[in-house]
Image: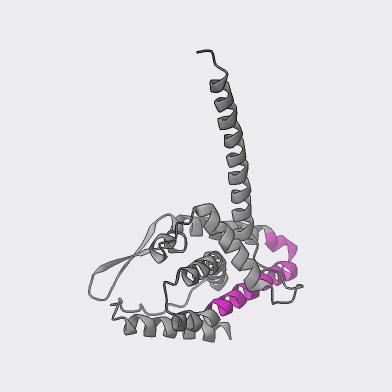
Amino acid sequence: RSAGEENRHKEVLSKLVEAYNIPMAPEPPYIEPKDTEWAYLVTGFSECVDSFFAFGLFALAERAGLFPMELIETFEPVMQEECRHILLFANWLAWHRATMPWWKRPVFEARVLGVWAFLAYERMDLARSIDSEGNEHTQDNNFTVTGAKDMTDIDIKVPELMQLCLDENDRRFSGYDHRLLRPTTTPNLVKTGLFAYRLWEKASGAVRARLGQTKQHAPA
């Protein structure tokens, strides 16, 4: 079912770019992965990361009125289906770990760390591809974060955007059975980052206030 929905998402996007006359490079032929577990882990964790930020960006675009309501209504089911896909991945991952022989777990966990390292490297660089005519194309793998600048004129700071992503992530998952596991790595990393940022803001504010008091009481 998820594969069928993903294919439909591709069709929706292709019709969108066609309607706006946006040229696209030809789709490369599908190459069946030799290591299906690695491929699924990369796809699953990548979707967990991208969907988390996409939830916030989608809400931001709706608030900004960037897109017509008809377009928002078209992509709303797509966003919720992505939520269901990563919910499936999170629970498959838990099941896979629980049913795996104990002696395979260390190797598997090393592979998971390898996937995260690969995704981190991928998002720090541009993906480059060559189309059938020999032209090079670049893709910003970090669009889910940097795209906010192009989507709205609303002055939103990174911590505010991250909080919006957290709120939308919670809202998207709120309708599912509480016994189902949710993806936690990206939300927890963002929560940790926000906590550290707020501590820094509080500490730096206290230092600035102390320096201000010192200047006021300094002898002329």
Q: State the colouring used for the structure image.
A: one colour
Q: Nearer the viewer, residue 101 or 180?
A: 180
Bounds of the magenta segment: 79-105
Q: Is residue 6 above or below residue 211?
A: below
Pick the residue in front: 27 or 51. 51
Count of numbered tags: 0
Residue at 59%, 76% (x, y): give it: 85
Q: State the image coordinates of residue 217 (x, y, percent, origin top left).
A: 57, 18
| Residue located 35% across and 80% down the image | 17
Q: Which residue appears at 37% of the width and 59% of the height?
A: 126
Between 41 and 36, the residue placed more toward the observer is 41
Kindly tell me whether residue 112 is visible in this rendering.
no
Check the image and report above or below for 167 versus 78. above
Asked whether 90 falls inside the magenta stretch, the response is yes
The x and y percentages for residue 5 are: 53, 84
Q: Is residue 102 magenta?
A: yes
For the point 50% across and 67% down, which residue is it? 60
